[in-house]
Image (spheres, grey):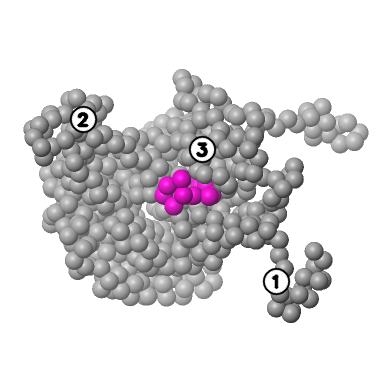
Amino acid sequence: MDEQLKNELRRQGVVATTLQELYNWGRKSSIWPLNFGLACCAIEMIATTMARYDLARFGAEVFRPSPRQADLMIVAGTVTKKMAPQVVRLYNQMAEPKYVISMGACAISGGPFKQGYNVLKGIDRYIPVDVYIPGCPPRPEALLDAFLMLQRKIDEQQLTGPDRPRHLQAELPSEFTVPECSEHDLTPTRNDAIWQVPLVNISNAGKNESGRD
Amino acid sequence: MSVLTEASIDTISKPANDHLHGDLLEISMGPHHPSTHGVFRMNIVLDGERVVKLKPVFGYLHRNHEKIAENETYLGSMPYTDRLDYICSITNNWAYALAVEQLAGISVPERAEYLRVITGELTRLQNHAGLIGFLLQDMGASGTPLMYAFREREKVLDLFEALTGARMMCNYMRFGGCRCDLPDGWMEQARKVVDGFPRFLDEFERLLRTNEILMARTQGVGIVTRQQAIAAGISGPMARASGVNYDLRKVDKYSIYDRFSFRVPLGEHGDVYDRYMMRLLEMRESIEILKQAMRDLPAGPIVDPNTKLRNFRPKAGEAYGRIEAPKGELGFYLISEGGPNPYRYRVRPPSLINLTLLEEMCLGQNVSDIVIILGSVDIVLGEVDR
């Protein structure tokens, strides 16, 4: 509908909307996060829910301890190889539509502990991540920003058509392979369907146009 | 102290097979549980609601801190110590700096010692405030106490941010002093926070100290006797709640703690209530120390000018530096071979040692008491698993 006409109607006391807008507005305004903290970032996540930053302003104050009742998983902290299977299992137990915020350097890539033998180098190797927040730990404002970004993302989702999100496409998976702790590493070490090794074109990397370093 | 071995349901003597007793139930609590303060897991065997066996499972946050530090320069490990007990980063910095200063024979200027005491005691305030909030949250007082506690915590974090640039990961200490001096106006702000803190404590005590539910839930629950506490090497507020008069600030007199007059509160029963009260009383003593330190803060350099940070190679030897961290005795043990990185780097985490009595505290209690017993120990998994 024409935006100008819509505004004109609103001035007359008539609200015109689409089912999609209404549906997305409802979903984005009541995202219930999973009450799930892993490490340092969890403290900042708790601080975000407290009176000063007040995540409740955005409709997300209801932290649910059970994954069955949660819409959003905030992976807040270092994911170790011992913990990774549990994180993926919790994600699988959440009902669609579900979203993931990867909070902090550790959840994105292993962060300062990347060289550790027991640290997973990013949770996006096993589950799809919607929003990444860098920082060690990210400030509560950064988490709020990520949250607003997620709300914008939900707002733009199409109910129909080929671009509709995963939870509206029955053929797409909503559960992902749970890795197992084996002798040296997790098996499998990554889920190839959602994460590929980032390849850099080495022949051109770090060189200027003349071909020299 | 019993040695914790693989829990097997068959090894436990079964209760009499009458109509009052059913089968034993083995449950796994954690690593995802809202009240385990992180990713801690316990395998619990229950007879009805009564705990008959409890086995902690560690390692869900093992981040290879010690191994990374052995391949890192001495100064390079300083930011990693922030992330040990991530609620009180400054005291971790302090213990590590103390160990390296002993190893390399570095002295600390007067002003830096005062700054360390001020920031260290502020850390204790915000740690204890947060802890009692979480403990009451675990007990079912949803929201209000934790919100009050975090309101005060934020004030202290603002001071840390103004001083160090970070709310939680302060990375403030350096070998032979501190990283940066106080910014303009910091002291006035800090005085305001410290002077206003007793009001929060009064409010908190009025709110809940004699609350009937709180007393029924905590008194006589999770008792650690004096002998048990000493035998298990427990330290910090938890040991003092059991009546062990052991505070490194008095015993070791490290830094400049002999210049301040403060009392060491002691508990009598060693139950959850005593441990809760211990935190409240310790905060009042910390405020006393803070007031004296802020009054006496001298001018001068904040880092020993003879310390060289580049190409820092302490002579071969070993050192153990320990401080009274908010959770207990935090120690760093370092062995140097004269190289740029330590040969061995070991952390003595207070939370892990304080956890060793968890099974003894929980046996015979209800399953709902496990949560508050664990909460009263004050664990941080970054430090337990490292």
Residue sitting nearer the eye, B124 or A15: A15
Quadrant in which the N terminus of chain B appears: top left
Q: Say which element carries label 3.
A: helix
Q: Which residue is painted at 41% across and 61% down in the image?
A: B119
Q: Which residue is mark 3?
A: A92
Residue B63: percent from left, percent from top: 46, 36
Q: Is residue A56 left or right of residue B384?
A: right
Q: Is residue B129 magenta?
A: no
- Residue count near mark 3 (Cα–Cα under 10 Å), binned few <14, some 14–19, many ≥20: some
- The secondary structure type at the circle numbered 2 is loop
Front residue of A135/A178: it is A178
Identified by mark 2, the residue type is Val
User: Between tags 3 and 2, which lies in front?
Assistant: 3
Magenta stretch in the rendered image: A64-79
Crowding at mark 1 (Cα within 10 Å: few <14, some 14-19, many 20+):
few
Q: Could you tell me which residue is drawn at 56 percent across and 53 percent down? A: A138
The Cα–Cα distance between marks 1 and 3, rounded to whole angstroms, is 39 Å
Crowd around label 2: few <14 · some 14–19 · many ≥20 (10 Å): few
Q: CA distance from mark 2 to mark 1?
A: 69 Å
Residues marked 3 and 2, same chain: no
Q: Is residue B23 shown above or below B110?
A: above
Residue B3 tag number = 2
| Residue identifier under label 1 | A15
- Name the residue nearer the viewer: B77 or B356: B356
Q: Amino acid at mark 3?
A: Asn
Q: Residue A85 shows which numbered tag?
A: none
Residue ID at (24%, 28%): B7
- Report whether residue B108 is seen: no
Mark 1 or 3, nearer chain start: 1
